[in-house]
Image (cartoon, rainbow, N blue to C red):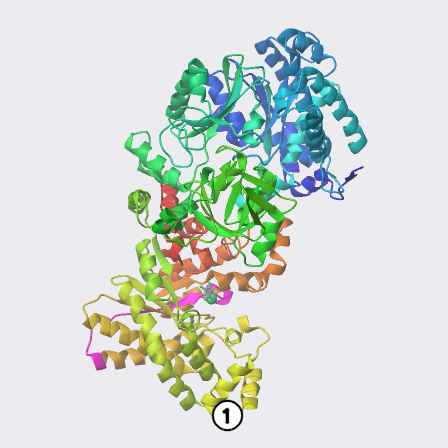
Amino acid sequence: MAKKSEKDVVGKATEVTVKATEKADKGKAAGEKYVFLFGGEGTEGDASMKNSLGGKGANLAEMSRLGLPVPAGFTITTECCNAYFALGGQFPEGLKKQVMTALAEVERLMGRKYGDAENPLLVSCRSGARQSMPGMMDTVLNIGLSTTTIPGLIAKTNNERFVWDSYRRLIMMYADVVMEKAEGIEPYDGKGIRRILDEMLDQYKYIKDCKADTDLTAEDLKTLAHAFKRRIKEVLGTEFPDDPMQQLWGGIGAVFKSWVGKKAVSYRRIEGIPENWGTAVNVQTMVFGNMGDSSATGVAFTRNPATGQNLFFGEWLLNAQGEDVVAGIRTPSPLNNATKTDQNRDMKSMEDMMPATYKELDAIRLRLEKHYRDMQDIEFTVEEGKLYMLQCRTGKRGGKAAVTMALDMLDDGLINETDAVLRVNPNQVMEFLLPIIEPKLEAKSQWLLKGLPAGPGSACGEIVFTSADVVRATRMGKKVILVREETNPEDVEGMRDAVGVLTARGGMTSHAALVARGWGKSCIVGASEMQVDAPNKTLKVGDKTLREGALITMNGSAGTVYEGALRLVEPTAGEDYAEFLRFMSIVDKLRTMGVRANADTAVDARKARSFGAEGIGLFRMEHMFYGEGSAKPLFLLRKMILCITVADRVAVLKELFPYMKNDIKGTMEAMDEFPVTIRLLDPPLHEFLPHSQLGRLELSKALGIAEDEVRKRVDALQENNPMMGHRGVRLSVTYPEMTEYQARAIFESAAELIRDGKKVIPEIMVPITCDVRELRHTKEIVERVYAEVVRRFDLKKLKYKLGTMIEIPRAALLADQMAADAEFFSFGTNDLTQLTFGFSRDDIGSFMSAYLDQRILAADPFQTIDQSGVGALIEMATLKGRAVRPDLKVGICGEQGGDPASVEFCYKTGLTYVSCSAFRVPVARVAAAQAAIKAAKQ
Ligand code: PEP
Ligand code: MG
C-alpha cells in the first residue's frame, strides 16, 4: 500500500503561486474567460495567444483557422491553472459552466455526445505551456470510456478489440497520472502503479505466448482491464472511476498538477522557465490511430531537426496511438523514402503504405511552413483513412540545424537577416565548437553499435545506467554517458549532467531526443542491437558485455558508438564550420556591443581570436602559476610570498620577470591591433602557500632558512577570510615593488612588439579596489615605470590606459570618484556577486541548490547576473562613472559575461563590451546581436 508523500503536491504548488492569488481573485470578479473553443468555425483563439492558451492550444486554434482538419476541442487557460493553485487545488468559480458550454459545442461539431451510451464522444486531456516542455507534463487519453459507453462504441466501430485496447490504455494512464502522481502518492519501493500494470501486461503476454501488444485479443484486453482495476484498488486504495464526468475533471486537475511534478520542476529550472507561467489544458476529441491497418499515428518535422536539411522528416506507426511514438516504446518507421537511413532502410514508409494520405500531409507541411515561416513540429493521426492534425508548434532543433535552416530560409526569402539571427539560441552555437572524433582515427575504427543520430557532437565517457548514477558520478568529476533501454523524461537531470545519452529504443522524435538536441548534447537513440540490463548495470552487443564504468566514445552526428576512448578534436574543418562562419558574419553586422575574451596565454588568445574575440577583457597575471609550465614560476611566487625584506622580494621579482613577460608578450602579439586588458596580480594567497613538507623543504633551501622558519612564515600568512584578505590592489599598497615589476613587464613587452611593427593596445587593470586613493597609489607607480620604459626604448608611440575592476560594492557606490582616475571600468561580477550577496564564491556548493530548489533564488547569481541587486550596482556605477568621464569604457569580465541573459542586460545597460571564456565568445556575439535587434524592435 502506498502512502501520501509528506509534501502534498497541491500544498507545494500553493506555496509557489501565492502571488497568483490576487490576480485570480481579480479574474473571478471580472468573470474571466477561462475556456476557448477550437476546431470549427467558432474557433476563439489564435497563435498570438500563447501566454494564455499555451503553445499547443494557440496553435490548435491557428490550424483550425487555417481550415486544417483539427478534431474539435477547447483549451482551459494558464490563468485558470494559476487560479487553481491559488485556491489550494480548487477549480475557480465559473469554470464548470464554461467547460460544459464548450463541451456541448464540441459535441455538436463532432456529432457525438460525451458519456452517451450509443454514440459516445471520447476526449484527451493534454498539457501545453507557453514554451514547449516535451514530455515533462502529463496527458490522459481516451477519457470518457466507461461501462456505459463501451458497448455503444463497440457497436458503432464494430471493433471490439480496439475499444478494449483503448480502455486498458485509459486505465493505465489514468491510474498513473490522475490517481497516483496528481495525488502526490510516492510508492514505497519506487515502483509506481504504471510499472505494476506494465508488468501485469508483460506477464499476461508471456502466459498467452504473445510477442506484441497487437497479438492480444479483445477478450484478453477485457480480462486485463478488469484485472488492472482490481489491482489499482489494492495498491492505491481507490476505485478507478466509471463516471465519464469524474474522469474528465480528474484529467483536467491532474494536468494542472503536473505543472508542479518533479520532471516539470527540474526542466523549468534548467531551462529558466518561470514558475508562474502555468500550463493550459487542452481537452480535445479523440481520434484513433489504433483502429486497424487503415489507421496510423505519427510525429514529423517540416525539416530535419538534427541536420536542418529541407526534407519532410518524421516517423510513424501503423495501428498505434501517439504515445507509442513519443514515449519511445516502439521504434517507429520513417515517414518517407528520402529520409531513410541504414538503420531503417527495410522499414515501410508512410509514403509507400498510404500514398494519398502522405501527399495530403505533405501539402499541409508546406502550408504550415509558409504560414509560420519556421520549421514546425507536428503530430497527426490517421483514423480509418482520414487525416487529423493534433499538434503543430515551432520545432526544437539542434544548433547546427538551427543555423542551416535560418540560412536556407534567408536564401529562400522566407525571412530576413534579423529573423535569421533571432532563430538561433545563442547557447546553441557552442555546437559548432563541439569536439569531433579525430577523423583519421575514426575512419580506421570499427564501430560497436549504430543508432539514430539524435544529438550532435562527440562524447567520450564511462557508461552508467541510471540518472541518479550520472548525477553521483559527475559530482565526483567523472565524465559519463547515460545508457538507457528507452527514452524517458524522468531522466532529465541525468541527461543534463551526462556528456552523452545512448538508448536502445525510441526514434528521432522521442522526448529524450528532443530534449538532448535542445541542449546540444551528443545523443544516439534506437541503437537496437544493444541489450540494456539496468539492474545489473551491463549492456550487451552480440557476445560482448560492457559493465558500468566501461569507456565508450559516441559520434552523435553519425549515430556510431565505439568501444574505448577515441581522441576528440576541435571541429574547425568542414562544411558545417563554413556555414557557422557565414551565420556569424551576419550576426556581427547586426551587433553593436563589443565581445572580448578572458585569456592568459598566447594559445588561448589565438583561439579566442579565431572565435571572434575583439580583444582580451581579462588577462589574469596569476594564471602563469597554474597549469602547464607553471612549476618554476609557482616556486618563485611562493618564495616571494615568504620574503620578509624588500630587497629579497625584488631579487625574486627579477627571477619572475621573464615568465611574466613571456605570457604578456605572447598574448599581446596574438591580439595584434586589439586591446589587451592585463589585470595586476590578484592571487588569493591561501591557494599558493606550500602545504607539503617537500614544498617547505625546497623553500627553506632556496631562502636559506630553517624549515621551521618557513612553517612559521606560512602560518603567519594564513587568513580567516582569504577572499577578503591580502589580495588585489592591497598587495600593491603593501608591496609596491610587485606592481613596479608587472608594469615593467607590460611596457617592455609592448615596446618590443611596437618595435617589431605590431599594434598593441595595453590596458592595465587594478583589481579589488574600494577607494580611489588605492587606484592613485598604483597609478603613480605605473606612470613612473612607463616614463622609464619610454625613455629607455625612445618610443613615444607607446600608449596605454589604466582602469579598475569594480568588484566591491563600495567601488560601485563611489564610481564617480573612481572614474576621476580610471579610464575604464570592468565589472568583476564574480567578486561583485560574492560581496553583494555575502555568499562566498568558493562555498556556495553547500547551499545554492537548496536556494534554487526552494525558489528563494530563481537562478545561480554566479552564472547569470542578479539583475535586481548586482545589476542595480552595475547600472548605477556606469551612470556615475560616465557622468564624470563621458567616454569611460565599461565592460564585464566575470563568468556571467558569456551568459546570454547577462549579455542582454549588459547591452541594455550600455556597456562597451562583455568578456568571457574563449568558447563562449560566439555565444556572446549572438546574444549581443539579438539584444540589439530586440531593442530596435521595441
Ligand atoms: C571577478 O571577480 O569577476 C573576476 C573576473 O576576477 P576573479 O574571478 O579573478 O576574482
Ligand atoms: Mg575578482
Identify the residue at image location x=21%, y=66%.
758
Q: 188 left or right of 323?
A: right
Q: Residues within 10 Å of mark 1 (few under 14, many from 20)?
A: few
Q: Is mark 1 within 8 Å of ligand 1?
A: no
Q: Quadrant of the C terminus?
A: top left
Span highlighted in magenta in the image: 792-812
Query: 886 and 465: which one is in front?
Result: 465
Q: Is residue 132 above or below residue 878?
A: above
Q: Which residue is mark 1?
A: 705
Identify the residue at image location x=70%, y=23%.
208
Q: Is residue 437 above or below residue 508?
A: below
Q: Quadrant of the N terminus?
A: top right
- Name the residue furthest front: 543
Any part of residue 404 in sight: yes
- What is the three-letter code of the residue carrying label 1? Ile
x then y, percent, for residue 728: 46, 73
Q: Quarter of the image holding residue 478? A: bottom right
x then y, percent, for residue 915: 39, 58
Q: Is residue 823 above or below residue 230?
A: below
Q: Quarter of the image holding residue 788? A: bottom left
Identify the residue at image location x=37%, y=24%.
370
x then y, percent, for residue 721: 58, 73
Query: Is residue 880 magenta-colored?
Result: no
x then y, percent, for residue 187: 74, 39
